[in-house]
Amino acid sequence: MLFDRLTSRWTLGWLIAALGVPLLLVATLLVGRTLTGSPAPAPVPAAAPVVTAPPSPTASPTPQESVPPAAPAPDDLPVVTYDPAPRGFPADPGTGDTRPLTAGLTPTRAVAAYDAPGGRPLAFLAPTISGVKLTMPIVDRRVGWTAVLLPSANRRIAWLPAGGWSTVDLPDQIVVERRPHRLTWYRNGRAVRSWEVSLGRPGQSTPLGRTFILGRTPPPQSVYGGVDIFALGAIPDDPDAVPTGLRGAHIGLHSWYTDDPLGKNVTNGCIRLTRSGQRKLLAEVPAGTSVVVVDQLTTPPATA
């Protein structure tokens, strides 16, 4: 049974944590009963988000373009879950782009996901994952087609034909800089607050690129400081590098029982910040919000 499998993973994960190894959020723990919705490219410097950013990720297509037809999707296509997404989806062409992604897409039924407009259907995206409403940031639009960040994958996008989904505004954005160990929360393109964070240790680095907040779950153990955890759409770049008990995992954004390790590379890939900072983000930032991990912004945020 799935819950039994999750329980055994967490038990081993807790034993590892007790030995001093920081935990990586186990993705398959995020079952619908506990997970709820909430209000590696080459390193290059990235520009800080600004309110005047070009609208290209959500721009409307020109009417002169023709609509590539969507090939029928076989009924036996896999459904994207917390396990790694099927292969074959295209790379995110804007993986280090820090321009805000201001619109999200939520499936209202099972929608086929394609590798290109008019391309091959590779999987279905359902309205929920483990009972949790799925909202993915929109990264591009063509006539009759919309591209979103793919969950359970790193730096991958999926193209969806029109129909079977709705959109929602996403005013927030989180930017994480690996070199200065800084997380900045933006709203409507303006920096609201920055925090010092701890990130992945060598060999288990926090993945670069664009991902998003998938949902939240209560802390499974006291080491998380008693504060809920954000599960991200990203997974470890090298799944075999994480401890055996933490295999099949997603990257998490969470607090810790102590702030002493902040500003260091000590996690299994997760992003760790203060308990007060995590509570603030949990209260303000909804699921579907984009999270961009870069090495360093060319211009530090005003809140740095």
Image (cartoon, helix red, strand yellow):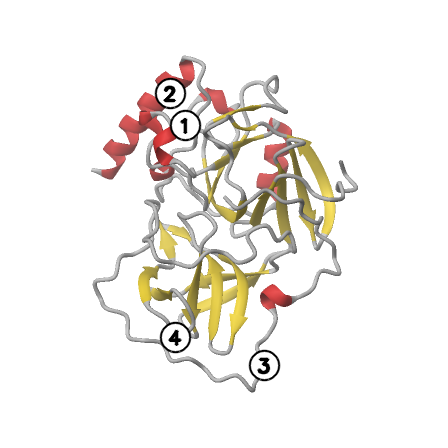
Query: Quadrant where the C terminus lies?
Result: top right
Chain-order first, disc 1 or disc 2: 2
Q: Which mark is residue 14?
A: 2
Nearer to us: label 3 or label 2: 3
Give me the residue at 42% from left, 80% from top: 68
Q: CA distance from mark 1 to mark 2?
A: 9 Å
Nearer to us: label 4 or label 1: 4
Q: Position of 192 compared to 2: left or right?
A: right
Label 3 belongs to which residue?
62
Which is more toward the observer, 295 or 130? Answer: 295
Nearer to us: label 3 or label 1: 3
Q: Which mark is residue 118?
A: 4
Which is more toward the observer, 232 or 45? Answer: 45
Q: Position of residue 170 (x, y in %)?
A: 60, 57
- Residue type, numbered disc 2: Trp
Q: Position of 1 compared to 105: left or right?
A: left
Q: Position of residue 221 (x, y in %)?
A: 43, 23
Q: Does dot 1 land on a helix, a strand or a loop?
A: loop
- Residue type, numbered disc 3: Thr
- Residue type, numbered disc 1: Pro
Q: Residues within 10 Å of mark 4 (few under 14, many from 20)?
A: some
